[in-house]
């Protein structure tokens, strides 16, 4: 119940739902009260923020510093026994191609995990994540099936299908790997927060970012100047991770007290 409540409240604080709610407040002021100037100001503010966050230069400027915390992993460190891939968005439809069940950030994470697994012969690849909603298959198992469809032997795959969030994933991985170094694969924007959770557990993760989103390479001019839901999604990720880090620090401080 608390987990669901946290997700709902957190979702309402993201840019799109928050700005829609703000616009709704402004429209109520315009239509049902005498506060016309205030209503116009609220609607204008929400519209302006929505426009700016839907532009590539603004959205990626917000996201880029978070993703830049760790470079892409190209190391060949010896003794790596585990490549841990954190769970993300998924659904499960047995009629779909296996990879279609990994949505949002999950497929790039799995692809990077497989690349690193192949770069470290003898390693096991670990997928984490509980079942979401009424799905009959967990996030970890869904990712494992995708990996098998791409040639990873079932014997080299470990699934941890109980953790529901990153803090629980860190605790679950600790029981498996102990203090030995391992590769930690997750989205570039999520990696700083994930690394903090894993280090809190006394683990030794080596950061391996995937799914980089913020673009600093050339784009067509219309992609830079026209608002798009793609760029709004980038702003959403920046805001989501910022809220997550704030909550992480607050709960860590409370635990320390």
Image (cartoon, rainbow, N blue to C red):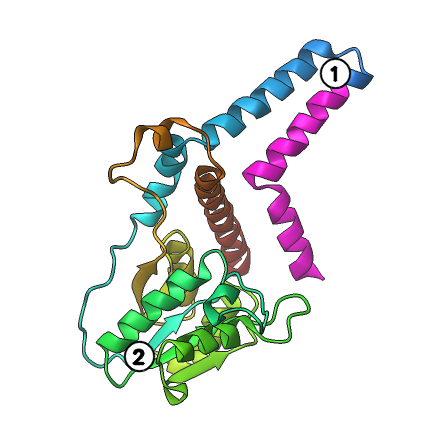
**Horizontally, is 83 left or right of 102 in the view?**
left
Query: Which residue is label 2 attached to?
Result: 180
Alpha carbon separation for disc pair 1 and 2: 61 Å
Query: Which residue is label 1 attached to?
Result: 30
Residue sitting at x 67%, y 58% = 4
Q: Are marks 1 and 2 in contact (CB under 8 Å)?
A: no
Could you say where residue 158 lies in the image, as x and y percent from the top left?
Answer: 43, 82
Q: Earlier in the sequence, mark 1 or mark 2?
A: 1
Q: Circle 1 — which element?
A: helix
Give neighbour class at mark 2: few <14, some 14-19, many 20+ (Cα, 10 Å).
some
Q: State which region is magenta.
A: 1-29
Could you say where residue 245 lies in the image, as x and y percent from the top left?
Answer: 46, 50
Q: Closest to the observer: 231 or 77?
A: 231
Answer above or below: position of 175 versus 3: below
Residue 199 visible somewhere in the drawing: no
Residue sitting at x 64%, y 32% = 20
């Amino acid at each position: 119940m608390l987990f669901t409540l946290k997700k709902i409240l957190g979702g309402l604080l993201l840019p799109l739902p928050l700005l829609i709610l703000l616009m709704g407040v402004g429209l109520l002021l315009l239509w049902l009260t005498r506060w016309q100037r205030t209503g116009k100001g609220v609607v204008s503010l929400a519209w302006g923020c929505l426009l700016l966050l839907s532009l590539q230069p603004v959205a990626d400027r917000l996201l880029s510093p978070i993703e830049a915390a760790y470079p892409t992993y190209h190391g060949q460190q010896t003794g790596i026994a585990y490549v841990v891939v954190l769970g993300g968005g998924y659904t499960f439809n047995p009629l779909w191609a296996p990879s279609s069940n990994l949505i949002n950030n999950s497929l790039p994470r799995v692809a990077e995990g497989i690349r690193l697994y192949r770069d470290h012969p003898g390693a096991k690849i670990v997928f984490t994540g509980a079942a979401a909603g009424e799905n009959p298959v967990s996030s970890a198992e869904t990712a494992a099936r995708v990996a098998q469809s791409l040639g990873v032997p079932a014997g080299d795959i470990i699934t941890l299908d109980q953790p529901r969030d990153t803090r629980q994933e860190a605790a679950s991985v600790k029981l498996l790997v102990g203090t030995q170094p391992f590769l930690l694969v997750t989205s570039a924007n999520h990696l700083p927060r994930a690394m903090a959770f894993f280090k809190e557990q006394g683990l030794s993760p080596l950061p391996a970012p995937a799914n980089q989103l913020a673009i600093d390479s050339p784009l067509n001019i219309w992609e830079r100047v026209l608002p798009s839901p793609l760029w709004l999604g980038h702003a959403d990720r920046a805001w989501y991770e910022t809220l997550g880090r704030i909550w992480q620090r607050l709960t860590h401080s409370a635990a320390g007290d």
